[in-house]
Image: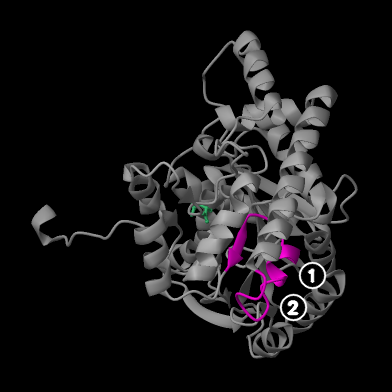
Amino acid sequence: MFERLTRQPDDPLLALIGIFKADPRADKVDLGVGVYRDEAGHSPIFRAVKAAERLIWESQDSKAYVAPEGDQAFLDLLWAMVGGKSSPVYAAGVQTPGGSGALRLAADLIRQAGTGKIWLGLPSWPNHAGIFAAVGLQIETYPYFDVPSQTLQLDSMLAALQRAAPGDAVLLHASCHNPTGAPLSTDDWARITAVIAARGLVPLIDSAYQGFGAGLEGDVAGLRALIAAVPEALVAVSCSKSFGLYRERTGALYAVAAAKAAAETARSNLVAIARTSYSMPPDHGSAIVKTILGTPALYEDWSNELDSMRERLASLRRSFAAALGDRWSNSLAIGKQEGMFSLLPLTPAEVMSLRDKHGVYMPTSGRINVAGLKLSDVTRVAGLFRSI
Ligand code: LMR
């Protein structure tokens, strides 16, 4: 059987982890995979995560199964953070192995409901298309961002969505757009919401960076307005970045509806799909998140540390954009984008040249993880970008 298989290429983004590690140059720079890094280039464990793990170690007295949908207390606390404490909608959640697990469950549900199509922005996180194609969904695209001019293409996006059929699914990023970092204003969200509601489209909102752009509330304001204005939505949440729990694979998918019965029917389908896929989600990461969100002192410490990460990213962006100067026609836009990523107008050959000559690593798309810069190194690294 194995002989009939063809060898698959490595995931180009994840492969960068190993390629970077193998480079012996001391001054190499990792702008690859989206993991937060501090000024020392280290990806730290939040203080509150360590404290929560200690509490869990001391108090947990069983490793028996929790429940098919995961830990309901975790799901409730996480929804209060994402959807708000007084959300007008009903959200039925299932805990998932990371945000990618949530997206895959959403894809399966969309397919199971008989919807054939999902609309993705151009560009989007490369794995989005892979996940939806894997379940046989047809992928349509809407323009989102023009790389050379570093500008949002909102009018073209809305015109494309006007052509979507009622019931089609539409993927949106809640904040900190991956790969462009291009923020949506309140007015942009209102215009997107109006088209989605008028066309009867079903939004699937990917929320993976809450706290890294406009803060814990600001990063979900558009999401909250949208889900309040449509009869049904899906919200995929990742705890990888916001809680620094990357390897713990912690996330959730919420079926959101104005009516409780509809949301609970969707949840029963999600639980059934999960049962034949991975049975039940891992618990450790969700126990950490539940402990932090449910313990005021830990919550405060966690949100303060998250704020400091957000501020570091914003200040790195400003310095990097200033140091790039007139390298591209709109380099300064990079300073105003949000979250970890920006998508630079580089050719694959330029990306490879930066890698080979200078040890600066990023995917060939030209996406950079701003967190991989160091304030002490911004001038030097920007100089390398200017020299290419
Ligand atoms: C990224 O985009 O770098 C992260 O979301 C990591 C991943 O899984 O691709």
Q: Residues within 10 Å of mark 1 (few under 14, many from 20)?
A: many
Please identify the quarter of the rendering in which residue 98 is found.
Answer: top right
The main secondary structure of the magenta stretch is loop
Where is residue 287 shown, x and y percent of the image? 64, 27
Is 286 contained in the magenta span?
no
Please identify the quarter of the rendering in which residue 349 is found.
Answer: bottom left
Q: Is residue 266 visible to us here?
A: yes
- Relative to residue 168, is residue 255 depicted above or below? above
Tag shown at residue 373: none
Q: Which residue is mark 1?
A: 230
In the rendered structure, the answer to whether residue 124 lies left or right of residue 20 reads right
| Label 1 vs label 2, nearer the camera | 2
Is the distance from the Cβ of mark 2 to the nearest ligand 1 atom less than 8 Å?
A: no
- Please state the extent of the stretch shown in magenta in the rendering: 325-343
Q: Nearer the viewer, residue 160 or 271?
A: 160
Looking at the image, which residue is at 39% across and 52% down? 16
Is 326 contained in the magenta span?
yes
Q: Amino acid at mark 1?
A: Val
Looking at the image, which residue is at 62% across and 32% down? 286
Q: Which residue is mark 2?
A: 196
Do the numbered discs 1 and 2 sit on residues whose CB atoms are within 8 Å?
A: yes
